[in-house]
Image (cartoon, helix red, strand yellow):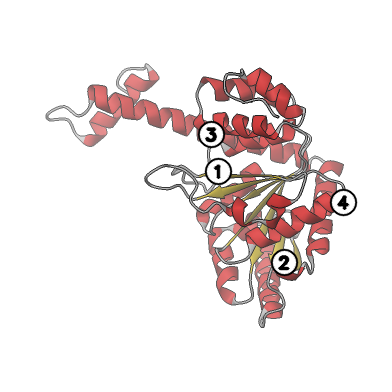
Amino acid sequence: MQPATEGRTPAELLAAARDGERRAIARLLTLVERGGGAADAIAGATHRLAGTAHVVGITGAPGSGKSTLTSALTTLLVAGGRRPAVVAVDPSSPLTGGAILGDRVRMEAATVAGVFVRSMATRGHGGGLALAVPGAVRVLDACGFDPVVIETVGVGQVEVDVVAAADTAVVVVTPGWGDAVQANKAGLLEVADLFVVNKADRPGASDARRDLDLMLDLTEVSGACPKRRPVIVETTATKGEGVEDLLAAIDAHHAVLVGGTGLEVRRARRLAAEVRARLDHLLGEAAGQALVEAGPVAGETTVETARRLAGRILGTGDTG
């Protein structure tokens, strides 16, 4: 019988988690989500232990089959002797702040031995990825999971953030112009390393691939995407078709990163993005507190109030 996780220090939990205790892993992830001193301690400990896992981000429009594709991919990884983990980022409930979709309960991979699946709520964070996700990835990395797959919700400008938390960004579309156009509008053409045309057994799959190729041609001509051209893979995840090709493409992209300076560049960018997000969070909290303690005064314009409060937060006095 596994010991209860309550009452153990973050260091004790991490030691147990690295020995394979799944309840300890789950408890660590819960502490990371909650934030505070325990999360800071976990971040400090895992920062020195992480850095081995290949982080794969998967995003796409609702209904594109991301969860089914992720299930098929992780099942294939386990069959190949690997130990994947999945972080499924769900929308937050406006009442509880918790994840409401629970993709993990719909994933066949959740029942495959060796796969750890966790749903995390966005908690209102505007980037599609929860602030806690980078910390969760480090925990799973430190516990020996590789690769770590992040599956995000929806498609739109906010999903561009997936590249900030992934070594390899995968964008899933389905037959029909809609998804391709949305990907183009959201800027996903610029951040995607791989495109997947899922449900490729449906009419319009070849058209979707052609549309993506055309958009990529135009992007290259404009000079907006000065990097390796994304590979396009066709899959039918419900039948397991094309999933081996997708895994091969993911591994090939990782090999290119490792063989050059790409991996270091991406991870430095990922850390910078996390620092910016956390600064925004901390400054937002400080701004809210300053507004409560020393809010608008009579006769003061909104600009004057904002400058005065900014000076209070930064300790510089009036920034006007």
User: Residue 89 at x, y = what percent?
Assistant: 56, 48
Residue 159, position as x, y percentages in the image: 56, 53
Mark 3–mark 1 CB contact (< 8 Å) = yes
Q: Of the residues shown, which amino acid type is indicated by label 3? A: Glu
Question: Alpha-carbon distance for marks 4 and 1?
Answer: 27 Å
Residue at 66%, 23% in the rendered image: 13
Query: Are the residues at dot 4 and dot 1 in contact (C-beta closer than 8 Å)?
Result: no
Residue in the image at 71% along x and 75% along y: 200
Q: Nearer the viewer, residue 257 or 299?
A: 257
Observer-nearest residue: 136 or 79?
A: 79
* Type of the residue with mark 1: Met
Give the number of the disc on residue 237: 2
For label 4, the crowd category at 10 Å Cα-Cα, with few meaning under 14, some 14 to 19 and many 20 or more, is few
Please indicate whether residue 127 sits to the left or right of residue 180 in the image: left
The answer to whether residue 192 is above or below residue 269 is below
Q: Please, what secondary structure does the residue beneath circle 1 have? A: strand
Residue designated by label 1: 120
Amino acid at pointer 2: Ala
Quarter the C terminus occupies = top left
